[in-house]
Image: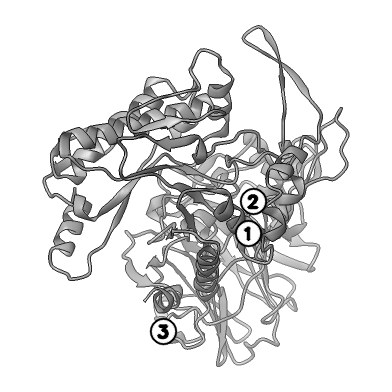
């Protein structure tokens, strides 16, 4: 109720109010659970929550403590500022397919406020019934109506892709069914169409089409079925493919007969899931890209747009990092590597060290070791392990090496390339080699991407042959990325592997990471100063699953996957490769509850200047 109370307070004390498009979502456990969309936990929950939301915005609802959907005293009437309702989430295509294939449900629904048209499926009929019931409830109880629509996205949009793999015959409830698998390469096998849901005579508010927008497939329109191309013959020739999402915005704007709204976002995280933008986006690039999409939406005739995140969300996960994390506790620390956490315009900064080449914030008690006229200081914060190296020869022209040992279960005292020896087993090797060629390497046995994605990247089983515990090979740290390549020629008898590409996540970026600097670079990992260099290594790059509880990955090949183990200390060394052996010293890992500050990203004023 704090959120709704805050809206009421703001709007009754300001001349320009804030407006709300109220979402009605489902938990992942329901959306990706078993059964069809008409089960009680799916349809029943959507409807029940929808009716509660009507009462909530009118200030007429009390939810007791213990209800999973939220609790509180909703006594403030914010309905004058609620634009409408948005039903659903990014739907699980399997639930849509399963619901539509069953012949026990009607595909038609005729309500007083919403009805389906010919061609609707059972899932669309379910959504129509939800929209009709919510509108009927508000109309009868409060004598008001609002816009209402449902969530959609490229994976479930109205468009049909050609079937490159031929027809598939499969068993369903003891019957042979022929199922067209259009767009199987893209996992696009279901369709939802807002045009199949039309307002009834009693409906005076109307509906809209809503899409969550992202780069689905380069030149997607090339892969439409022939029937689909014919159906869009009046639209496809006039699409502006140079605009955002390869003309997808133009297509939606021209296809729909109702208002179209889109949500869109871009992450400033260090890690990525796609190379569609040439790598991670810094905060400035985030703002510029967001406003490019917004302008393209205006040009395409959209009625509105929503940026998907106001603030970064530490609890979010991404498919290519979730396997590495203690997901129940990832809100305790800031994971720079998870793409899903960085979509906000405001961040929560926990950094105790500004990576800007200025050593003034470091105290003498942080010095870990000294050798060859150089001094290494070490700190930790909510984002990673931080180094300060000081010395008369410390510059971008001097190559330095920093072995790091964490596990005690694996690691090597030697490195084949570069040729180095260490006083203890090392799991990681930080190679500082100027502004453009510095990176963190991992011992091949402790490479989490090899264990988890080798089959998807190279078609090999990682457990058939794997590196020895003391292997002396140190390899680049990578992230698996999406492969959206569409194969033009395929064999319908076999499913060809499209291997996942990799991004070198361990490549370090030079720049000034201090937000107060005129040359601020939000993605910078290290920065040279006068006779010094500051470095931050993100926790996830060091295979920490939960730094707040000092949990790291145990040996993958003893445990057949990612298991967590607690450590209390690590070992860190420093050298330039001229010594016989790089000496390593113990560093105690301690964690204190993180203090954070809210900070508007550099993207915010860019958006503000356009929207103002």
Q: Are marks 3 and 2 in contact (CB under 8 Å)?
A: no
Q: Are marks 2 and 1 in contact (CB under 8 Å)?
A: yes
Query: Does residue 198 lie above or below 604 as drawn?
Result: above
Give the side of residue 508 with respect to residue 484, left or right: left
Q: Residues within 10 Å of mark 3 (few under 14, many from 20)?
A: few
Rendered residue at 44%/57% (across/down): 308
Rendered residue at 43%/80% (across/down): 515
In primary-sequence order, the first of circles 3 and 1 is: 1
Residue 136 point in image, percent of width and height:
26, 32
Residue 419 point in image, percent of width and height:
80, 68
Q: Label 1, on which residue?
A: 245
Real-space CA distance between mark 3 and mark 1, rounded to the nearest whole angstrom: 34 Å
Question: In the rendered view of the protein, which quadrant contains the C terminus?
Answer: bottom left
Rendered residue at 60%/48% (across/down): 320
In the orientation shown, which residue stands out farthest toward the top?
174
Q: Label 3, on which residue?
A: 516
Real-space CA distance between mark 3 and mark 2, rounded to the nearest whole angstrom: 36 Å
Give the side of residue 192 with respect to residue 488, left or right: left
Assign a secondary structure to mark 2.
loop
Q: Are marks 3 and 1 in contact (CB under 8 Å)?
A: no
Query: Does residue 412 lie above or below 466 as drawn?
Result: below
In primary-sequence order, the first of circles 2 and 1 is: 2
Q: Label 2, on which residue?
A: 216
Q: Is residue 27 visible?
A: no
Q: Residues within 10 Å of mark 2 (few under 14, many from 20)?
A: some
In the orientation shown, which residue stands out farthest toward the front?
201
Give the side of residue 59 with respect to residue 540, left or right: left
Q: Nearer the viewer, mark 3 or mark 2?
A: 2
Query: Does residue 534 lie above or below 4 as drawn?
Result: below
Residue 375 point in image, percent of width and height:
54, 81
Q: Residues within 10 Å of mark 1 (few under 14, many from 20)?
A: some
């Amino acid at each position: 109720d704090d959120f709704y109370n805050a809206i009421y307070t703001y709007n009754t004390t300001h001349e320009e109010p804030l407006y709300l498009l109220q979402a009605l979502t489902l938990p992942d456990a329901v959306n990706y659970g078993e059964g069809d969309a008409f089960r009680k936990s799916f349809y029943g929950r959507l409807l029940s929550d929808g009716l509660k939301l009507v009462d909530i915005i009118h200030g007429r609802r009390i939810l007791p403590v213990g209800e999973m959907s939220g609790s509180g005293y909703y006594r403030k009437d914010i309905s004058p500022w609620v634009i409408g309702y948005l039903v659903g989430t990014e739907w699980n295509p399997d639930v849509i397919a399963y619901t539509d294939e069953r012949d026990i449900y009607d595909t038609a629904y005729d309500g007083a406020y919403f009805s389906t048209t010919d061609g609707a499926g059972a899932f669309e009929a379910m959504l129509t019934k939800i929209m009709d019931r919510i509108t009927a409830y508000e109309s009868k109880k409060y004598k008001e109506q609002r816009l209402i629509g449902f969530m959609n996205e490229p994976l479930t949009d109205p468009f049909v892709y050609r079937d490159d793999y031929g027809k598939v015959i499969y068993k369903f409830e003891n019957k042979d069914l022929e199922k067209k698998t259009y767009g199987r390469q893209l996992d696009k096998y279901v369709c939802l169409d807002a045009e199949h849901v039309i307002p009834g005579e009693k409906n005076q508010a109307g509906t809209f089409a809503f899409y969550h927008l992202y780069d689905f497939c380069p030149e997607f329109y090339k892969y439409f079925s022939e029937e689909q191309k014919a159906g869009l013959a009046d639209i496809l020739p006039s699409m502006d493919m140079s605009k955002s999402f390869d003309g997808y915005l133009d297509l939606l704007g021209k296809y729909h007969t109702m208002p179209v709204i889109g949500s869109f976002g871009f992450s400033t995280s260090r890690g990525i899931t796609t190379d569609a933008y040439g790598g991670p986006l810094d905060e400035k690039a985030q703002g510029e890209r967001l406003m490019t999409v917004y302008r393209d939406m205006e040009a395409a005739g959209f009625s509105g747009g929503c940026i998907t995140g106001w603030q970064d969300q530490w609890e979010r996960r991404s498919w290519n990092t979730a396997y590495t994390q203690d997901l129940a506790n990832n809100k305790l620390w800031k994971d720079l590597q998870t793409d899903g956490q960085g979509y906000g315009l405001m961040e929560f900064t926990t950094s105790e060290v500004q990576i800007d080449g200025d050593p003034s914030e470091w105290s003498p008690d942080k010095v870990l070791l000294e050798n060859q006229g150089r001094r290494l200081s070490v700190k930790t914060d909510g984002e990673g392990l931080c180094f300060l190296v000081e010395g008369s020869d410390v510059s971008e022209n001097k190559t330095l090496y920093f072995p790091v040992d964490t596990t005690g279960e694996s690691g090597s005292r030697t490195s084949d390339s570069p040729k180095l020896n260490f006083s203890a087993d090392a799991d990681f090797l930080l190679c500082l080699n100027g502004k453009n060629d510095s990176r963190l390497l991992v011992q091949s046995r402790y490479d989490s991407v090899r264990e988890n994605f080798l089959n998807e990247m190279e078609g090999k089983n990682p457990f058939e042959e794997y590196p020895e515990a003391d292997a002396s090979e140190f390899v680049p740290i990578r992230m698996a990325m999406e492969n959206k390549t569409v194969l033009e020629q395929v064999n319908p008898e076999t499913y060809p592997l499209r291997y996942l590409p990799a991004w070198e996540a361990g490549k370090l970026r030079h720049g000034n990471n201090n937000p107060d600097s005129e040359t601020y670079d939000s993605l910078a990992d290290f920065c040279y100063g006068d006779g010094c260099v500051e470095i931050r290594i993100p926790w996830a790059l060091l295979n920490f699953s939960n730094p707040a509880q000092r949990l790291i990955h145990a040996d993958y090949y003893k445990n057949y996957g990612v298991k967590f183990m607690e450590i209390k200390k690590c070992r860190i060394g420093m050298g330039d490769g001229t010594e016989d052996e790089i000496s390593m010293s113990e560093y105690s890992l301690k964690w204190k509850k993180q203090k954070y500050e809210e900070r508007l990203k550099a993207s915010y004023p860019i958006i503000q200047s356009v929207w103002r």
